[in-house]
């Protein structure tokens, strides 16, 4: 049993929880809690190691650890509390390689996020995008780190169900060639449910505070809005993304 917070694996997990630059440098992230760890294992992601407390047990994780001969290390509750990013640790966390962007060859339906800074919002948008069935989510350089602990928790496994890539605007432009590109804007000239969603498209969602930036604006051909009651200034970015995505993709689910 690991009893010291000076253990190298514990120190690595703690550092990865705290800084995006360390995650990028090491190519690693921390998944914490039963749902995230189990989802990652069931979708074929292999951890460098897993840490668990004495009280924690899950049959699915136990079976996977045994079958794949994964490194599962027991730690004290105090060590888990130190390594954890939550107030009430669930007793399991794992250090996993960052997923490699694997964008499908055919990207008919794209969600592009620009300057989404709030981790909870970003995770919720990813979860919504996965539920709606878009082909991929592209993040502009000014978005918050998609693999930050709070984003991972808010995404509730969406990171393993939808292709996700942080790209330069040049690369984003490349992937949107030949598509109708719409940008969500409260003052847009077209209602979101009047847009032509019948062919390949990309939707750009910007930050609540400042909207999408100049790079996004130069890419979009049309600004679309969501009609709202009088005196309502704006919608939460995740709510706006959900409304537009399910309208755009509803034909696929009928």
Image (tube, rainbow, N blue to C red):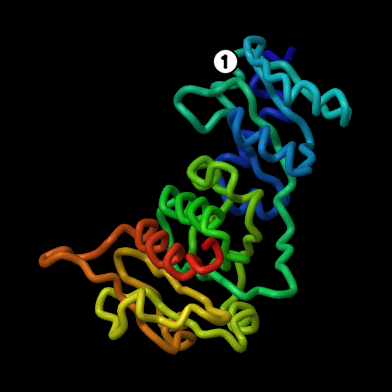
Residue 196 falls in image quadrant: bottom left
Q: Residue at x 32, y 64 (%)?
A: 208
Of 220 and 14, which appears nearest the observer?
Answer: 220
Apparent side of residue 29 relative to residue 216 in the rendered image (left or right): right
Apparent side of residue 6 relative to residue 238 in the rendered image (left or right): right
Of 147 and 22, which appears nearest the observer?
Answer: 147
Place of residue 64 in the rendered image (x, y in percent of width and height, measured from the top left): 80, 28
Place of residue 93 in the rendered image (x, y in percent of width and height, measured from the top left): 64, 29
Is residue 173 depicted above or below 1 in this figure?
A: below
Place of residue 97 in the rendered image (x, y in percent of width and height, measured from the top left): 74, 46
Is residue 10 depicted above or below 202 in this figure?
A: above
How many numbered tags mark residues here? 1
Q: How crowded is mark 1: few (under 14 residues within 10 Å), some or many (20 or more)?
A: few
Of 4 and 141, which appears nearest the observer?
Answer: 141
Is residue 104 depicted above or below 223 in this figure?
A: above
Place of residue 90 in the rendered image (x, y in percent of width and height, measured from the top left): 55, 22
Q: Residue at x 29, y 70 (%)?
A: 226
Of 137 and 249, which appears nearest the observer?
Answer: 249
The residue carrying mark 1 is 78
Q: Dot 1: what SS?
A: helix
Residue 146 falls in image quadrant: bottom right
Is residue 111 depicted above or below 98 in this figure?
A: below
Residue 66 falls in image quadrant: top right
Residue extending furthest toward the front: 254
Q: Which residue is drawn at 31% across and 78% down?
A: 191
Apparent side of residue 239 relative to residue 32 in the rendered image (left or right): left
Quarter of the N terminus within the rendering: top right
């Amino acid at each position: 049993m690991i009893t010291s917070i000076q253990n190298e694996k514990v120190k690595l997990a703690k550092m990865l929880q705290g800084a995006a630059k360390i995650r990028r440098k090491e190519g690693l992230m921390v998944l914490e809690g039963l749902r995230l760890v189990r989802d990652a294992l069931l979708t074929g992601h292999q951890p460098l190691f897993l840490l668990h407390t004495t009280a924690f047990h899950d049959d699915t994780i136990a079976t996977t650890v045994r079958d794949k001969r994964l490194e599962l290390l027991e730690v004290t509750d105090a060590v888990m509390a130190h390594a954890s990013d939550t107030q009430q640790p669930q007793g399991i966390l794992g250090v996993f390689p960052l997923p490699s962007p694997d964008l499908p060859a055919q990207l008919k339906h794209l969600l592009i996020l620009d300057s989404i800074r709030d981790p909870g919002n970003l995770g919720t948008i990813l979860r919504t995008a996965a539920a709606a069935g878009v082909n991929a989510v592209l993040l502009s350089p000014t978005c918050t780190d998609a693999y930050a602990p709070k984003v991972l928790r808010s995404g509730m496994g969406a990171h393993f169900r939808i292709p996700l890539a942080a790209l330069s605007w040049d690369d984003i432009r490349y992937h949107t060639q030949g598509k109708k590109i719409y940008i969500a804007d409260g003052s847009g000239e077209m209602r979101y449910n009047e847009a032509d969603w019948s062919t390949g498209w990309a939707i750009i969602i910007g930050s609540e505070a400042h909207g999408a930036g100049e790079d996004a604006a130069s890419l979009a051909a049309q600004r679309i809005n969501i009609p709202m009651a009088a005196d309502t200034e704006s919608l939460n970015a995740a709510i706006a993304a959900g409304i537009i995505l399910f309208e755009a993709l509803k034909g696929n689910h009928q």
